[in-house]
Every structure is written in C-alpha cells, then in structure tokens.
Image (tube, helix red, strand yellow):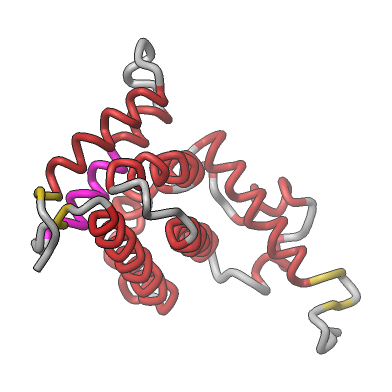
Amino acid sequence: MSESNGKSIYGDAGARRRRTLDAAAALLDEGGYSALTIRSVAKSSGTSTGLIYQYFADKQEIFIALLNESQLESTAYVAALPRDGGVASLIAAVIPNSVRQWARVGRMTATWRDIEGATRSERESVRELRVTAEQYNEELRRALLEAAEAEGRTLLDDPALIRFVLSGLMGVSDTIVNRWAPNLDATEFAEFSAAVITRGITAPGAAG
C-alpha cells in the first residue's frame, strides 16, 4: 500500500527508483546496451522485477530515463559555468562533464536507436527526451554567446552551430573514454579541441 509521502511497505519509492537507475548505469558500463534487461537490473539492484515494472514499462524506459537525467544534469552544469574566460575556456570546462555523461550512457545511444528502431519515436518518454535535449542546446548556445561577448568576439549566426559543437564534444568524449589516443594527455587534448571548436564558431569583433 502506497502512502502520500512516497513511501510504502516496500520502502522509499524515490530511493528504490534511484537504485534501479544506478544499477542500470553499472550494467551499461559493464556490458553495453545488450546487458540491460529487467531481470539483470532487478538482480543488481537487489529488488524484484515486479517492483521495477511499477516504475518502468521495459528496459527502454530505463535507458530513456538515464538519458533524460544525463541531459538535465548537463543543462544545470553548463548553466553554472563562468562565462568571463571566453569561449575556449567555456568549452574546455564543458568537456569533463561531456566525458562523464558519454561514459555513463551517451555512447550507447546509437546502439539503442539501432536495436529499438522506430518504436522508440512513439513513446511519450522520447518526446520528453527531445524537450530536455532542446533545453540543453539552448543553455549551451546561451553560454557560448555570453562567453563570446565577454571576450569581445562574435558567435557565428548559423543554425548548424550547436550541432557542430555537440559533434565536437561527442568526438572528444569518445576519444577520451575509449582511449583512442592513449599517448595524448587528456587535459591537453581537451584544451586543444576546445580551441579548435572555438575557431570554427567565432569571429573577431563584438556583435552588432
């Protein structure tokens, strides 16, 4: 029997959901998307499949919840970053969070799309995911614009700009997470990449 404070005879609902997501993230890290099943999550989190089904209809919903959580965390992270160091400094500061989120769940997104196919687009949770993705994109654009203004540069007015930045962040994150360039220092690589991305999206001179 559930109670209004979120607790039941089985324990705190919020804590149980948190354990489920943490267990799912660990399974993804160990074995990729194919390792994520309701049964494996239940075993790893120390609960039953029945209790997990109270919160998630299937493993897709668990994965989508992790993606959504990742995007919300990233939005808050970018919002808190200082802008006064300029665009390259901002992007360099974004990269560590991008690496964390890529390692946790982002790198499995393509596999999820390939395996689940068209059915994912029909879900309400996927529509919500698109909203949080757009919120992150807008926060990142705002941060880049303010950082450019702080150093007297102009952010290029191009609809492809954010996609270009996101592609760069994903490429850098994938290289660091998978150690594609083991002889490179990760911090130096991140700073170099931030400078290269900055040159591609800014021009000298204040806007206006």
Task: Between residue 163 and residue 47, name the one nearer to us.
Answer: 163
Residue sitting nearer the eye, 34 or 185:
185
> In the rendering, at what x and y percent does residue 109 appear?
37, 50
Q: As drawn, which residue projects farthest toward the bottom? A: 4
Dominant SS type (magenta): helix
Tell me residue 197's x, y (percent): 20, 41
Q: Which residues are magenta?
A: 160-171
- The residue depicted at 74 percent of the width and 51 percent of the height is 45
What residue appears at the point 36 percent right and 46 percent down from the top-left corner?
85
In the image: residue 124, left or right of residue 162? right
Q: Is residue 59 visible?
A: no
Query: Where residue 136 appears, x then y in whole percent?
Result: 37, 64
Vertical side of 87 occupied by 60: above or below: below
In this view, which residue lies farthest toward the right?
9
* Picture quarter with the C terminus: bottom left
| Quarter of the image that includes the N terminus | bottom right
- Where residue 169 sits: x, y (%)? 30, 43
Residue at coordinates 9% horizontally, 61% vertically from top-left? Answer: 158
